[in-house]
């Protein structure tokens, strides 16, 4: 689920106006889920989609690149990390945006499920303690990115309005456990986010299983450690908190031979420029060392590759900034 208002939520969960599911996301061209592997990741999944087919006025206005990471060996074989890069495609900034995972759990007999919350791990989970013999397995979702979380247990099957979905993503911790066995769904969300036009935010979850609660918590700790290893970079605080690193503009749009980026750099440092395609694949471009702070201009020449939509990312010691461009070869 992604939403920035009670009237603008894009998702594929149960809806009150569409039965049985909402179908708000559209796969982009060449954005179908594809799998590969590398020396670091046994299974790497990539997909790209947007909500452009939602009626005007109800669209959130985002492009999402989804990347998943999975491993075959202990201690990393009982979870999948799912990374969402959400780009604002509107000309106006987004405010109060939330990104969530809605999970309709059915652990054996669905009516006997129970749910709870582990605040220390940002881990929501479900289990079934009513089976004879009991089912010891636990399943859940954990928020790995360092964002404010909301968690909601939704007991018994319900059709959800967009207003309810947004409320559940943004309300914090109103109902974090079940009152007894029932059909349970959970919604773990991150936010609120403010996204300038053509900029992006990243939200990372883990989807986990465990032989029991202790094992589930151990797997959540392993997922958090793995994400710190592969996905996080240490950011240095800006000497001037009122001015942050950003791409202030990019010209021309579309670009055919080069694009000029205007940057603000709060202090001297090295900036790495990369291009990211709609499947989330990163193309390293250039690294530039700036000896002074302030407004900077940098031109990137066209690189070998297909025409299409790309995200130019500038990574600095003070954070990252992203802008969306259309390359026409």
Image (spheres, helix red, strand yellow):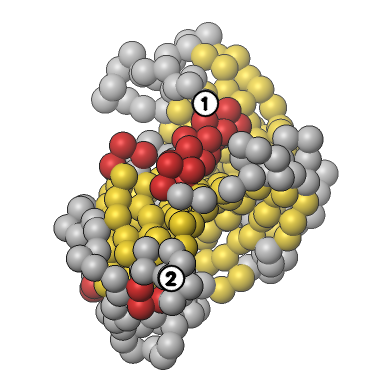
Q: Nearer the viewer, mark 1 or mark 2?
A: 2
**What is the quadrant of residue 39 in the picture?**
top right
> Dot 1, how many residues are within 10 Å of its Cα: few (below 14), some (14-19), or many (20+)?
few
Residue 67 vs residue 59, the one in the foreground:
67
Q: Is residue 62 visible?
A: no
Q: Position of residue 44 (x, y in %)?
A: 70, 49
Q: Position of residue 96 (x, y in %)?
A: 26, 54
**What is the quadrant of residue 283 in the picture?**
top right
Residue at mark 1? 233
Residue sitting at x 36%, y 27%:
244
Q: Classify the position of the N terminus by image quarter.
A: bottom left
Disc 1 secondary structure class: loop
Q: Classify the position of the C terminus by image quarter.
A: bottom right
Would residue 81 appear left or right of 157 to someone viewing this image? right
Q: Of the residues under marks 1 and 2, which one precedes in the sequence?
A: 2
From what the image shows, is residue 121 above or below residue 92?
A: above
Q: Which mark is residue 132?
A: 2
- Residue at the farthest front position: 133
Q: Position of residue 7 (x, y in %)?
A: 26, 74
- Residue at the farthest top position: 291
Residue sitting at x 32%, y 60%:
115
Q: Position of residue 122 (x, y in %)?
A: 35, 43
């Amino acid at each position: 689920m992604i939403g920035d208002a009670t009237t603008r939520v894009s998702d594929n969960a149960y809806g009150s106006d569409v039965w049985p599911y909402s179908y708000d996301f559209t796969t982009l061209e060449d954005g179908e889920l594809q799998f590969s592997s590398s020396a670091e990741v046994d299974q790497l999944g990539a997909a790209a989609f947007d909500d452009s087919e939602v009626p005007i006025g109800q669209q959130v206005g985002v492009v999402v690149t989804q990347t998943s990471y999975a491993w075959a060996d202990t201690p990393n074989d009982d979870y999948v990390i799912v990374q969402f890069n959400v780009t604002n495609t509107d000309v106006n900034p987004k405010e109060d945006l939330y990104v969530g995972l809605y999970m309709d759990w059915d652990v054996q007999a669905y009516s006997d499920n129970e749910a709870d919350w582990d605040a220390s791990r940002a881990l929501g989970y479900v289990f079934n303690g009513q089976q004879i013999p009991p089912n010891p397995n636990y399943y859940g979702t954990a928020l790995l990115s360092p964002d404010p979380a909301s968690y909601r247990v939704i007991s018994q099957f319900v059709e959800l309005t967009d207003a309810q979905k947004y409320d559940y993503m943004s309300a914090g911790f109103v109902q974090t456990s079940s009152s007894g066995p029932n059909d349970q769904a959970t919604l773990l969300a991150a936010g609120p986010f403010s996204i300038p036009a053509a900029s992006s935010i990243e939200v990372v979850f883990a989807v986990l299983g465990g032989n029991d609660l202790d094992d589930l918590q151990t797997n959540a700790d392993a997922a958090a450690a793995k994400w710190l290893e592969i996905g996080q970079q240490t950011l240095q605080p800006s000497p001037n908190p009122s001015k942050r690193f950003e791409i202030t503009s990019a010209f021309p749009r579309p670009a055919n031979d080069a694009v000029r980026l205007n940057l603000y750099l709060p202090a001297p440092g090295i900036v790495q420029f990369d291009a990211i395609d709609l499947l989330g694949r990163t193309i390293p471009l250039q690294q530039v060392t700036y000896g002074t702070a302030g407004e900077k201009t940098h031109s990137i020449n066209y690189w070998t590759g297909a025409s299409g939509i790309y995200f130019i990312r500038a990574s600095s010691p003070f954070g990252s900034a992203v802008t969306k461009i259309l390359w026409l070869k």
